[in-house]
Image (cartoon, helix red, strand yellow):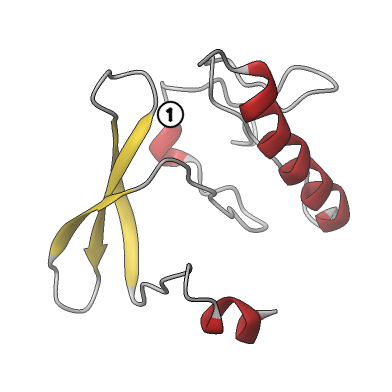
Amino acid sequence: MQQRALSNPKIEAIWNSVVVEGHGDEKGRLLGGVKVKNVVSGEVSDLKVSGLFFAIGHEPATKFLDGQLKLDSDGYVVTEPGTTKTSVRGVFAAGRRPRQEVQAGCDCCWHWLATFLLMPP
């Protein structure tokens, strides 16, 4: 799968980097881009995107969301039961507790569909 992604001309791998900030589109309604910091050089660049997926691993790396989305006592994003909807309209979360990767993959697919089917233009 890694080789398929790397050989796809529509996918650009950005190595040694972390997302440090997200910002809205021109209308301020949707994600318009992210600031990406190269951890080797320290350089910060702006990357225009319309979607973003964070893989948070076995320990939730959700500290950057504190105060913006509802989190549970363990730091996981709280979703509306049976959906991927979070406490913020238009923000979806996919995944489960550790070792439930198959369900997380299904959630990702549902999130993608929900974004286009449930959000008004």
Tell me what residue is drawn at x 21 percent, y 79 percent: 40
Residue 37 in the figure: left or right of residue 111? left
Residue 24 in the figure: left or right of residue 102? left
The residue singled out by tag 1 in the image is 66
Q: Is residue 42 visible?
A: yes
Tell me what residue is drawn at x 59 percent, y 76 percent: 5
Quarter of the picture holding the N terminus: bottom right
Quick one: 108 or 81, which is closer to the camera?
Answer: 108
As displayed, is residue 15 above or below residue 30? Answer: below
Instruction: Report x, y in % for residue 93.
Output: 64, 34
Tell me what residue is drawn at x 44 percent, y 40 percent: 63
Alpha-carbon neighbours of circle 1 within 10 Å: few (<14), some, or many (≥20)? few
Residue 102 in the figure: left or right of residue 114? right
Instruction: Report x, y in % for residue 117.
Output: 69, 23
Instruction: Report x, y in % for residue 92.
Output: 61, 29
Tell me what residue is drawn at x 50 percent, y 16 percent: 121
Instruction: Report x, y in % for residue 116.
Output: 63, 28
As displayed, is residue 84 above or below residue 9? Answer: above
Q: Is residue 95 visible?
A: no
Q: Quadrant of residue 77?
A: top right
Q: Tag 1: residue type?
A: Asp
Mark 1 lies on a secondary structure that is loop
Quick one: 12 or 62, which is closer to the camera?
Answer: 12
Q: Quadrant of residue 109?
A: top right
